């Protein structure tokens, strides 16, 4: 059976995380509800350190694809609870950067860009500005150069079937 790409993406992101800590002040509700009922510590803090989400805003990205990208970004923010999240709107260059920590803020953001495609520009921007994420997710149609392998894990989420990045993990999503 085919694995749901959203589940695989969450698994890839949370595999690099580990900042969540235990607390007795907030009990684990699942352990209280399932027999044998046990009072166990719950979790607190961030599941994930910093995350960079590179959104392809080139002319080849349709509004449907952009909507799917924002929906997935909201899912990452709410389920993975990163310490910080930088959203890099990228076409041939980084056209804008937004820092978001709440999925509800995504609806107030305006995508920036719309020209050609060159995803290595996002990696160069992060290096130049001292942005070192624990995980980087690139949401794209894969009609781009890829650049060189990064020091941090990169997950490519592609809307184009049968295209794979030369480094990192590539996931295919179906939109529309």
Image (cartoon, rainbow, N blue to C red):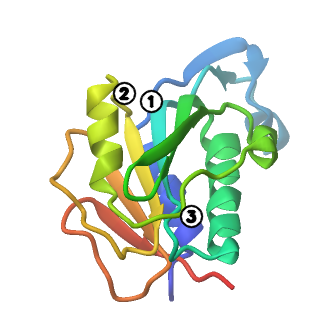
Q: Nearer the viewer, residue 175 or 44?
A: 175
Query: Residue 138: which quarter of the image?
Result: bottom left
Image coordinates of residue 142 in percent, x first then y, are 37, 74
**Quarter in which the C terminus is drawn:** bottom right
Q: Circles 2 and 3: CB distance less than 8 Å?
A: no
Q: In percent of the image, x 68 and y 52: which residue is there?
A: 75
The residue labelled by disc 3 is 7
85 relative to 71, above or below: above
The residue labelled by disc 2 is 131
Q: Is residue 35 visible?
A: no
- Going from N to C along the chain, the mark reached first, 1 or 3, is 3
**From mark 2 to mark 3, how far is it between C-alphas?**
26 Å
Query: Residue 144: which quarter of the image?
Result: bottom left
**Other-residue count near label 2 (Cα within 10 Å), few / some / many at <14 / 14–19 / ≥20:** some
Q: Nearer the viewer, residue 120 or 136?
A: 120
Query: Residue 36: which quarter of the image?
Result: top right
**Other-residue count near label 3 (Cα within 10 Å), few / some / many at <14 / 14–19 / ≥20:** few
């Amino acid at each position: 059976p085919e694995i749901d790409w959203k589940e695989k993406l969450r698994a890839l992101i949370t595999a690099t995380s580990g900042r969540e800590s235990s607390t007795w002040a907030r009990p684990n509700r699942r352990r209280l509800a399932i027999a044998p009922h046990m009072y166990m510590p719950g979790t607190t803090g961030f599941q994930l350190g910093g995350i960079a989400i590179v959104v392809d805003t080139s002319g080849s990205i349709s509004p449907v694809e952009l909507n799917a990208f924002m929906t997935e970004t909201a899912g990452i923010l709410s389920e993975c609870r990163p310490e910080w999240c930088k959203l890099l709107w990228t076409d041939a260059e980084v056209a804008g950067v937004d820092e978001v920590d709440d999925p509800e803020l995504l609806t107030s953001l305006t995508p920036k860009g719309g020209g050609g495609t060159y995803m290595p520009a996002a990696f160069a921007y992060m290096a130049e500005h001292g942005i070192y994420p624990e995980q980087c997710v690139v949401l794209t149609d894969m009609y781009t150069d890829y650049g060189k392998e990064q020091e941090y894990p990169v997950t490519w989420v592609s809307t184009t079937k049968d295209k794979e990045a030369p480094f990192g993990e590539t996931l295919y999503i179906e939109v529309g």
